[in-house]
Amino acid sequence: MNNNDENKISIKQIAKLSGVSPATVSRVINNNGRFSEKTRHHVMKVIKENNYGMNYIAKSLRMKKSFTIGVLVPDISNAFFSSIVLRMEKYLYSKGYSVIICNTDRDEQKELAYLRTLEGKMVDGLLVISGDQEFDPSVVQAQTLTVCIDRKPKNADNVVFISSDHYRGGLLATEVLIKKGCEKLGIIISHENLYSSRERLRGFKDALETYGLPYSVNKVIRVEDKETKPEAARLQILKSLRQGDLFDGVFAINDRLAFGAMKACREFGLKVPENVKIIGFDDDLLCTYSSPSLSSVKQDSDQLAKKACDLLLKLIHLEVLTSNERCQIIPINIVLRESV
Amino acid sequence: MNNNDENKISIKQIAKLSGVSPATVSRVINNNGRFSEKTRHHVMKVIKENNYGMNYIAKSLRMKKSFTIGVLVPDISNAFFSSIVLRMEKYLYSKGYSVIICNTDRDEQKELAYLRTLEGKMVDGLLVISGDQEFDPSVVQAQTLTVCIDRKPKNADNVVFISSDHYRGGLLATEVLIKKGCEKLGIIISHENLYSSRERLRGFKDALETYGLPYSVNKVIRVEDKETKPEAARLQILKSLRQGDLFDGVFAINDRLAFGAMKACREFGLKVPENVKIIGFDDDLLCTYSSPSLSSVKQDSDQLAKKACDLLLKLIHLEVLTSNERCQIIPINIVLRESV
DNA sequence: GTGAAAGCGCTAACAA
DNA sequence: TTGTTAGCGCTTTCAC
């Protein structure tokens, strides 16, 4: 299996060694027919013996197809994002595609620059996960196939959109708190530009209204966008608490914020869930292992990733999508634990 | 800024539009000299007007250089790995490189297949993060530049190796437990094939010896390789506890296992840190937010990533590395929290 | 069933 | 300072 040849061998050389033309070798490799079984056997033998490996760059240039997908994501170190990317990579690998990963860092300029690079590298499609603004398809070439996950495309016509049901997640999470008896709710939120955040907030508000809890007595606690860490949530909650904003229920827009909130409450002398009930979003692996364990809204990241890839592959294969397919909402689940 | 042209324009066309030769356009774009300021101005104007974007595939084919780095990682959804990958991507992006991400899934066949693909895509270098076996450079072409992170290369001559000081991490973590008065220690471990796991275990054993604690009365609790989740750790610890293996200190080879251990102890009626002291490894963001907060060994993932990239870039630029550079150990830090 | 030849878009000799 | 030309390794007509 040792492949330590200094120079990669080309189809041309394989052709020479096999006594056939490059065209025939190409046909054999790609199983395009128009060759005899005998030829196939012989060529394959020579290929094996010489440890030939396809030069995908040349193939790409010729075919205008790179067998590579670009994945745009704000921050791969986020547990939810990385779990989606993991699924995508696995699925796409099984279909013969590689994945170029692009952390946009929520920086529009970087995103734009990456888009240029990806186009130059002839990616066959784009998977866009989350992001502050709506995704504007006009910043890429018209033929760039794109699927947006948890991020609204500006012009829904050209781009496929797929998302968890964040609105319902916010609604149900809030409902849980209310049904458990909470009367003064707080929501702790960051990245309000995010489609997903806005939807979760909308769910929260609608739940309050449904249950006749005036929004005014409740509290929106904002965390700076750049501070996605639990620490920022902890400080904000503590500040609110000290200002006399006592609440008996907190819906945290994500689990990290929830962990911070939980710690803040503890430090302030409030017990979870006795005095304050808390529910998060994303169902991080560690929700189970915090104490008390954290209730959360679970997104079906597997399905999200798989559907997104499937749709992109369909676009790549020039299939026509129905309008139902072009815009899909994936249901979420509530996972109840000790924190409520 | 709208770039919705159906067909990308080529250097040749830019040349025609500018009234110069393709060679000159190329020189201008790449700033290779041999053109007048006047020409530069004019060509750049035409490039802007026509929204020209470089075709990197063609460039790669010609230059045998793809401006792309392959990153091999067992599982990007692991918090520590994803934080390293994040850093790598940021750094490499700033140097003009893209990153193809490859989850090996700890599957040798997949790894091998990926290596073939990456070679075919002409990656300029390989960043190999962790992995069960030693990395065998003979499975890639000799000219494939490789930096291994936390994974020993089989033949240290050709490949750069960089790692955290796992041994010292294990040693110090264990020492902390001992100094806090623990006398019957347990270590909970998974993935024992991993270089990093073995080193941490070695540190544990050496610490015991140094402090005269017989290894026999201590306990190695193993978790199946495929079960990297806290749940497996919880069950194993619970099992040990029920069998009467009472310990007063646990060194968990990573934080996930530590969280599981913590939960198991709680369920068994033991208090952390009063009855059992626990320390983990990796310093996950959530160590601070568990209750009790978890002590841990912190790897300097920023430095690990940056150094690895720097070394790879040096190799790419054909710089000669000193033997000190070719093999580097990065110091770790102990972070003490409530759990001890 | 097979081969010859063109060309994807770029860069790098070499010539001028 | 600029242009001409060849060719990277592949696929794909078109001819036989």
Image: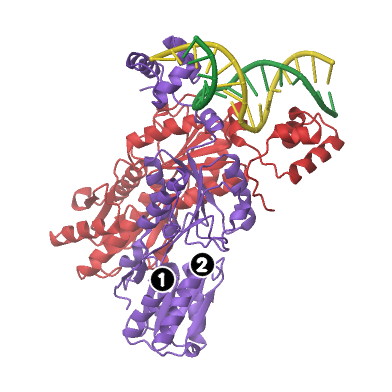
Chain colours: A purple, B red, C yellow, D green
Q: Nearer the viewer, residue A23 or B51?
A: A23
Asked whether, in this view, residue A87 is left or right of residue B158, the answer is left
Q: Which amino acid type is marked by label 1?
A: Phe
Q: Position of residue B32 (x, y in %)?
A: 75, 31
Residue B236, image x, y percentages = 20, 56
Q: Residue at x 47, y 55 (%)?
A: A77
Viewer-side residue, A311 vs B29 = A311
Label 2's element? Answer: helix
A322 above or below B17? below
Q: Is residue A3 visible?
A: no
Task: Please give the label number shown on residue A195.
Answer: 2
In the drawing, does residue B49 fall left or right of residue A124?
Answer: right
Residue drawn at point x = 44 percent, y = 67 percent? A256
Q: Disc 2 sits on a residue from what chain?
A: A
Q: Which residue is mark 1?
A: A259
**Label 1 is found on which chain of the structure?**
A
Q: Residue B263 — which label?
A: none
Determine the secondary structure under disc 1: helix
Sort mark 2 into few (<14), some (14-19) or many (20+) by Cα contacts within 10 Å: many
The number of numbered discs placed on residues in the rendered structure image is 2
Q: Is residue A162 above or below residue A98?
A: below
Quarter placement of the N terminus of chain A: top left
Amino acid type shown at disc 2: Tyr
